[in-house]
Structure formats: structure tokens, C-alpha cells
Image: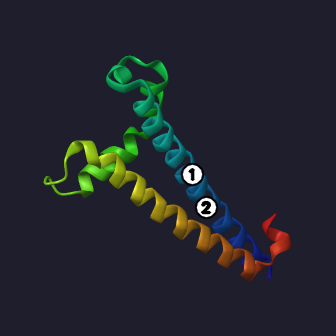
Amino acid sequence: MKDTDNAGDSLLTFVSVIKLLSEIALLALVGQGVLGLLVGARREQNLFYQLLQIMTRPFVSTARLITPRAVIDRHVPIVAFLLLSFVWIAATFTKISICVRIGVELCK
């Protein structure tokens, strides 16, 4: 019984980390988009925009590798947002499934 609890705990930790990373990346992408709309053409000189761009660069680069060349570079962050949304949804459902299996009390 202890081995299955440890396996459930480690899997729960892994899924929680994936969920958390996707949440941070999603919020950074949303923040970057909103700030880009507010600042306009001078967004490249904005320190906070640059910080958000650094945070989202690995996810946008990965989305660029996955997408065909026909996708415009301007649309790649939207693709990254959609991919991260799918990852977040999958991690949420997986976490719920694990919590139902091992017990909600152990999930807190």
C-alpha cells in the first residue's frame, strides 16, 4: 500500500508542476499581449514587455518548431497559448483523476 501511495504522490507532484508551469506561461503570454496592446509600437523598449518576452521565449520557440512555415511569426504566440491551454487542461483532468483515485484528503 505504501508503494502505491508514493507512486501516486510523485505522479501528483509531477502533474502539479506541469500544471503550474503552464499556468505561469499562460499568464505571461496574456500579460505580454495586453501590455503589447497598451504600449503599442514602443513595446520593444518596455522593460516589463521584455521580461515577459524572456519568460515566454521557450514556449514560443517550441511552438515555432511545431508549426509549419506558413504560419506567420506574429501568430506563433497565439499557437503557443493554445498549446499551453491544452497542456493545462490535460494536467487539470489528470490531477483530478489522481486525486479521486488516491483520495481527496491526500491531494491537499
**According to the image, label 2 marks what residue?**
14
- Whether residue 57 sits left or right of residue 47 in the image: it is left
Query: Mark 2 packing: few (<14 Cα in 10 Å), some, or many (20+)?
Result: some
Identify which residue is drawn at 45% across, 29% down: 38
* Quarter where residue 43 is shown: top left
Q: Residue at 55% of width from left, 50% of height from top?
A: 21
Residue that carries the numbered disc 1 in the rendered image? 23
Residue 89 image offset from top left, x and y in percent: 54, 67
What percent of the width, then of the height, locates residue 80? 37, 52
Q: Is residue 40 above or below residue 67?
A: above
Helix, strand or loop at label 1? It is helix
What's the residue type where badge 1 is placed?
Glu
Residue placed most toward the observer, 7 or 27: 27
Which quarter of the picture shows residue 9? bottom right
Q: Is the residue marked by circle 1 packed among few (<14), some (14-19), or many (20+) residues within 10 Å?
A: some
Vertical position of residue 5 compared to residue 88: above or below: below
- Relative depth, front residue between 46 and 106: 46
Q: Nearer the viewer, mark 2 or mark 1?
A: 1
* Residue 69, placed above or below residue 34: below
Compute the Cα span from label 2 to label 1.
Answer: 14 Å
Q: Which comes sooner in the sequence, label 2 or label 1?
A: 2
